Structures are given as C-alpha cells and as structure tokens.
Image (cartoon, rainbow, N blue to C red):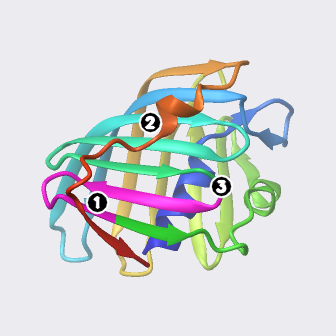
Amino acid sequence: MIKRIFLLLLTLVVAVVGKDAIVLPTSFQANFKQTITSDKGKKIHYTGSLLFSSPNNFKWNYNSPTKKEVCTNEVELLVVDHDLEQISTYLIDSDLNLVKILKKAKQHKKLIYVAKHKEINYTIRLNNKKQLQSVVYKDNLDNTVVIIFSKVRYKNTKIKPSQLKCNYPAHYDEIRG
C-alpha cells in the first residue's frame, strides 16, 4: 500500500518536453479530486492539494472526507491522519526509481502517456499546456483510481523545504512501518 502511494506520487508530477520524453518540472502545485472505485462499484471521493519540488519531495494535503497529509523527503514517507491523531512513517524502498518509471512511459495518443511499473498500468493525461491533467490506474486490489488535477502551476524554482513538511501536534501517536 505505501509503496503504491509513493509510486503514484512519483508518477503524478510529469511534464512533456519532447515528443516522447517525460521529465519532472522543478516544482509543481495543483488541486486534486481523487475517486477510488472498488470492483463492486463502491466509490470514495477525496479532494485536496499537492506540492512537489525536485528531486522527489512531495506533500499531499487531503481536505475531504478526512484531513490527512502525505509527505516525503526522498528517504521517508510520512502519513499524518489528523482524524485519528496518528503519524505513520515508512522508509522508501530503494527499488522505487522515478527515472525507471518515466523511461517506461510511452506516448499512446496526443497528450496521453502510458507506463507500466511493478505490474501496474498508469495512464497519464496532459492538458494543452502539457501539464498534468489526470492519472488513472487499477491497484492490486482491483480498485480503479482516478485523480484529476486543477489549478495546475509548474515553476522553474524549488519550493521551500518548510512548505513540504507535514505538520502535526507532538501528542499524535507514531507508528513506524
């Protein structure tokens, strides 16, 4: 599960600079709507915002239906669940290699790219500005995950590390994975 979250984080922040080349922008921010549909048709909807700064620093802020933050600093993945008052920390698997994923992505149609990594197929759609528009994949529990981005902003400067940190009170329970 955590590997899947990190893999998705790595795959999400792409921009196209050449006909077939996919590279990371220096930084990226956007709002998102995420829908997870089970194999039985049950849906759950999430909304929030995302920050990315190269080389591999992310912060996902989930606002609805639960308040959660997911952050990484290239070494650890931190999940802060504010509703449960719990922090889960995981070491990032060295096998999760962003360069490998991006090298695998191939243009399928205009502004649509596909990549397969660890038996998961990802479909990445870009808007007319060649900025991230959506990502769709089916996880290994047969859930279909659709993430649609809005208010996308790519920048040529890094985001301050303090903006990418998860924030939580000292009394939250901590779990190490």
Q: Main secondary structure of the magenta part?
A: strand
Judge depth for marks 1 and 3 and give the one in front.
3
Q: Identify the residue at image location x=51%, y=31%.
A: 162
Q: Is residue 31 above or below residue 12?
A: above
Q: Is residue 104 above or below residue 130?
A: below
**Residue 16: numbered disc:** none
* Residue with the most extreme front position: 170
Residue 164 visible somewhere in the drawing: yes
User: In the rendering, at what x and y percent does residue 163 appear?
Assistant: 48, 29
Are the residues flagged by discs 1 and 3 in contact, CB closer than 8 Å? Answer: no
Q: Identify the residue at image location x=50%, y=61%.
A: 77
Mark 3 or mark 1, which is nearer the start of the sequence? 1
Left or right of 101? Residue 79 is left
On the image, numbered disc 1 is attached to which residue? 36
**Element marked by disc 2:** strand
On the image, numbered disc 3 is attached to which residue? 74
Instruction: Indicate whether residue 81 is drawn in magenta.
Output: yes
Instruction: Indicate whether residue 172 is drawn in magenta.
Output: no
Are the residues flagged by discs 2 and 1 in contact, CB closer than 8 Å? Answer: no
**Residue 50: numbered disc:** 2
Tell me the distance, in whole angstroms, between the alpha carbons under discs 3 and 2: 16 Å
User: In the rendering, at what x and y percent does residue 67 appear?
Assistant: 20, 46
Highlighted magenta segment, given as a residue range: 75-87
Tell me the distance, in whole angstroms, between the alpha carbons under discs 1 and 3: 26 Å
Residue 158 sits in quarter: top right
Q: Identify the residue at image location x=62%, y=53%.
A: 10
Q: Is residue 153 above or below residue 41?
A: above
* Quadrant occupied by the N terminus: bottom left
Amino acid at circle 1: Ile
Left or right of 11? Residue 79 is left
Amino acid at circle 2: Leu
